[in-house]
Image (cartoon, rainbow, N blue to C red):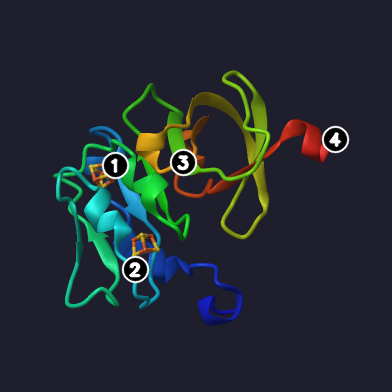
Amino acid sequence: MSHRQDGILERRQLLPLVPSTERSACGPVAIIECVENIPCDPCVEACPKGAIRIEGDMNGTPSVDFDTCDGCGLCVSACPGLAIFVVDMSLDAGAATVSLPYEYTPLPSVGDTVVTLSREGKVLGEGTVKRVLQALALDRTPIVTLSVPADHAMDVRHFLAKDVTA
Ligand code: SF4
Ligand code: SF4
């Protein structure tokens, strides 16, 4: 099934959206999984570093200057499409964090174990909640940061609370 049919990005579409292994190892960085030509650009305005650009008019798709982005996460909350994630691969060997927008209630708590899901909604494994950010400055969309195995970092894009799966 193609992206046009199910809305799930294909591997070939993801490749240009992710930073190099070298950049990923340097610290947190935003990954914008937005490939539709829609009239939208709050991510551009949200970035204090000017790291996000949309070529042409606002119907274009955004791109990140990975060398300028410091992974602050402000764009994550600003995106109405929930299409931006911050991945940090600079941690201890074998571990990474994924920060994602989360609009469900109740919010998880730091220390909770959750079930991690892929873009397709498939179960990947487990993650641990490291941080929950909810602030007016973040446009009210909470950001949840999960600790996950490093080899899941580019695939974890949602999660379920454990009691939902019980
Ligand atoms: S994470 Fe912060 S610095 Fe990076 S693109 Fe988003 S708003 Fe800009
Ligand atoms: S705010 Fe989100 S949906 Fe809108 S252009 Fe930026 S990444 Fe795409």
Q: Which mark is residue 40?
A: 2
- N-term mark: 3 or 1: 1
- Nearest-to-viewer mark from 2 and 3: 3
For residue 4, above or below residue 139: below
Q: Is mark 3 within 8 Å of ligand 2?
A: no
The 10 Å Cα crowd at callout 1, few under 14, some 14 to 19, many 20 or more, is many
Q: Which residue is mark 1?
A: 29
Q: Using the numbered discs, state the Cα–Cα distance from disc 4 to disc 3 in whole angstroms.
A: 29 Å
Quadrant that contains the C terminus: top right
Q: Quadrant for ligand 1?
A: top left
Q: Residue at x 29, y 77 (%)?
A: 59
As helix, strand or loop, the secondary structure at mark 2 comes to loop
Which of the two marks, 2 or 1, is nearer to us in this view? 2
In space, the residues marked 3 and 1 are separated at their CA atoms by: 21 Å
Q: Residues within 10 Å of mark 3 (few under 14, many from 20)?
A: few
Q: Which residue is mark 4?
A: 166
Give, as a three-letter code, the residue at label 3.
Answer: Arg
The mark lying in front, picked from 4 and 3, is 3
- Pointer 3 residue: 140
Q: Position of residue 131 (x, y in %)?
A: 48, 25
